[in-house]
Amino acid sequence: MEVMKATDIKKYQNWSCIIYSEPGIGKTTMIKSLTGKTIVFSIDGMYQVLHNLENVDIITMDAQEPNKELGNFYRFVVKNKDEYDNIVIDNLSTFQKFWLNAQATLSKSGMPEIKDYGVIDRVLLDFIASFKKLKKNLLFFAHEKKVEITRESGGVYTQFQPDIRNLDAIMGIVPIVGRMVIMKEPETQKRKRVIVLQPTQSTRAKDQLIGNLQTIDQLELLPTLQKN
């Protein structure tokens, strides 16, 4: 247990953030906007966009041994935490799929067992909570999924959410969850990438740090968090 004074809290220090979208929209590109030294855990191997970045180190994951590789990455970061300002996980959706695939190879049916889904829920939550204890800036990427939600009064609507298991618990310990989308500027009709920070019926999101923006440009979010 730790006791701290509210007057000592720095709002933007050691922030954590989840950004989700469909694949190929530009999540990994956001790493270019980080200042300081960054370590990236590239789970899906899609790191080519980061070429020539001097302050970025990349560790790739063996998809056949996700649980072992996750532990190895965590131990590496703990051992070298003084060298890094930012930790990036790219991405959680792919990790949980690789993890369940690995468990499927251990079962007679060739499919994950029911208990495996409860285990991966705990693994993801414990993983994020453990990294938060390192007091670094944390950036997690995920894919998006469509979820049909039934209102208490009846009727169904579709909402975009991060494709992450145990989502309610994870969103409870991460102050910013944003969805990246491509929009057209009304005046020029040019396409631009923005991050939706406020929840709507169609988008699962939250922002407990910045607080006054509906959306923010793709490459402005992380500098905004780091300069405050």
Image: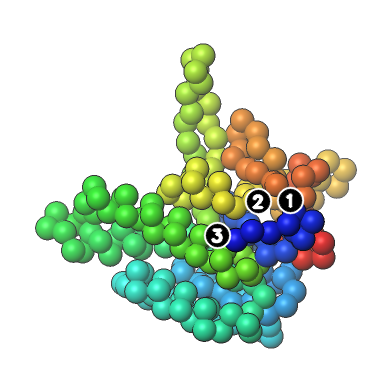
Look at 61% across and 38% down and name the residue there. Answer: 203
* Cα distance between the residues tagged 3 and 1: 24 Å
Disc 1 marks a residue whose amino acid type is Leu
Look at 42% across and 49% down and name the residue there. Answer: 165
Observer-nearest of 193 and 99: 99
Which residue is labeled 2 in the image?
176
* Cα distance between the residues tagged 2 and 3: 24 Å
Observer-nearest of 73 and 178: 73
Disc 3 marks a residue whose amino acid type is Met
Look at 46% across and 50% down and name the residue there. Answer: 164
Residues at circles 1 and 2 in contact by the CB criterion of under 8 Å: yes
Observer-nearest of 83 and 96: 83
Which residue is labeled 1 in the image?
209
Please tell me how crowded label 2 is: few (under 14), some (14-19), or many (20+) other residues with Cα within 10 Å. Answer: many
How many circles with numbers are drawn on the protein?
3
Which residue is labeled 3 in the image?
1
Q: In terms of secondary structure, where does tag 1 sit? A: loop
Q: Is residue 106 placed above or below 209 in the rendered structure?
A: below
Look at 44% across and 59% down and name the residue there. Answer: 126
Of marks 3 and 1, the one in the foreground: 3
- Mark 1 or mark 2, which has the lower sequence index? 2
Q: Quadrant of the N terminus?
A: bottom right
Q: Quadrant of residue 19?
A: bottom right
Rendered location of residue 65, percent (x, y): 32, 72
Rendered location of residue 145, percent (x, y): 49, 44
